[in-house]
Image (spheres, coloured by chain):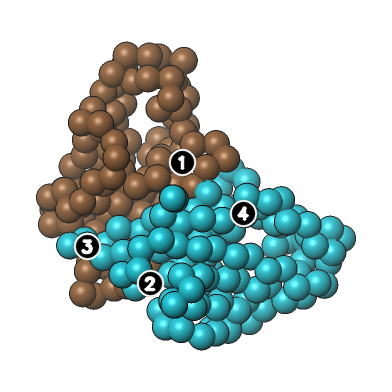
């Protein structure tokens, strides 16, 4: 069984740039959620994708966007980067509502630093 | 009021002692409750899930749920230095989709 994989693991960008983070879900999981974790904080829900559509969104501005592909992999895009976007970005896969109970399985994360 | 509240700690316990971690949540329709362990610089790892009132035991870990009090706890028996980590309480409130909300985490230090 293949776990959740994320890329890149670390990256440095400058303010105003754009970034794309990638995630491959665990085998058999067709729901992908993205979280932002700032230093010393708990993960904050950005959005969730199911069947290639955004299925729910947290309190993040529109410059945070995403995609899900037919193979259930997903991308997180952040435009116009701000210093406060520096964080660990976590991708988590899960079974969909009705089949699972919300257990999330996380990848190793992508550490983004915005200078 | 935060949706999921935890004491940030650090909680220090001696090796071999019982560590008790607590969490309260605000959404009464919450259905599923989780404890994740996160080592420094790593991603969260699921260690316990609990769905009904009462206790659930798995090895040295016991999760306790009281929906009337909106309270979840995690007990770690025979604490080991390797248990030193941040423990995140998470709650699933299904509102058309599975939204799992995390607390800020409690840092546990097990002193040898």
Between disc 1 and disc 4, the foreground one is 4
In the rendered image, which quarter contains the C terminus of chain B?
Answer: bottom right
Between disc 2 and disc 1, the foreground one is 2
Q: Residue at x 49, y 78 (%)?
A: B66
Q: Chain of mark 4?
A: B
Instruction: Label 3: state its secondary structure.
Output: loop
Q: Mark 2 highlights which residue?
A: B32
Residue B67 visible in rendering: yes
Between disc 1 and disc 3, the foreground one is 3
- The chain that appears cyan in the image is B
Q: Mark 4 highlights which residue?
A: B7
In space, the residues marked 1 and 4 are separated at their CA atoms by 17 Å
In space, the residues marked 1 and 3 are separated at their CA atoms by 23 Å
In space, the residues marked 3 and 4 are separated at their CA atoms by 27 Å
Evaluate if marks 2 and 1 touch, with contact meaning CB atoms under 8 Å apart: no
Q: Mark 3 highlights which residue?
A: B95
Q: Mark 1 highlights which residue?
A: A37
Whether A88 is drawn above or below B97: the answer is above
Sequence-earlier tag: 2 or 4: 4
Instruction: Label 2: state its secondary structure.
Output: strand
Q: Chain of mark 2?
A: B
Whether A1 is drawn above or below A32: the answer is below
Mark linked to residue A94: none
């Amino acid at each position: 069984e293949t776990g959740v994989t994320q890329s890149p693991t670390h990256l440095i960008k400058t303010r105003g740039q754009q970034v794309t983070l990638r995630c491959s879900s665990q085998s058999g999981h067709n729901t992908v959620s993205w979280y932002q974790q700032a230093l010393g904080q708990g993960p904050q829900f950005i959005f969730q994708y199911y069947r290639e559509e955004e299925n729910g969104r947290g309190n993040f501005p529109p410059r945070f966007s995403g995609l899900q592909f037919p193979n259930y992999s997903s991308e997180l895009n952040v435009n116009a980067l701000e210093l406060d976007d520096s964080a660990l970005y976590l991708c988590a896969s899960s079974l969909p509502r009705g089949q699972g109970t919300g257990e999330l399985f996380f990848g190793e994360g992508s550490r983004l630093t915005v200078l | 009021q935060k949706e999921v509240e935890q004491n940030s700690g650090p909680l220090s316990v001696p090796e071999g002692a019982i560590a008790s971690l607590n969490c309260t949540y605000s959404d009464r329709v919450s259905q599923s409750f989780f404890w994740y362990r996160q080592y420094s610089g790593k991603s969260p790892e699921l260690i316990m899930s609990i769905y009904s009132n009462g206790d659930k035991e798995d090895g040295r870990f016991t999760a306790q749920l009281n929906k009337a009090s909106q309270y979840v706890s995690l007990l770690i028996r025979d604490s080991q230095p390797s248990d030193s980590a941040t423990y995140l309480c998470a709650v699933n409130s299904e509102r058309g989709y599975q939204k799992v909300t995390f607390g800020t985490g409690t840092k546990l230090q097990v002193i040898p």
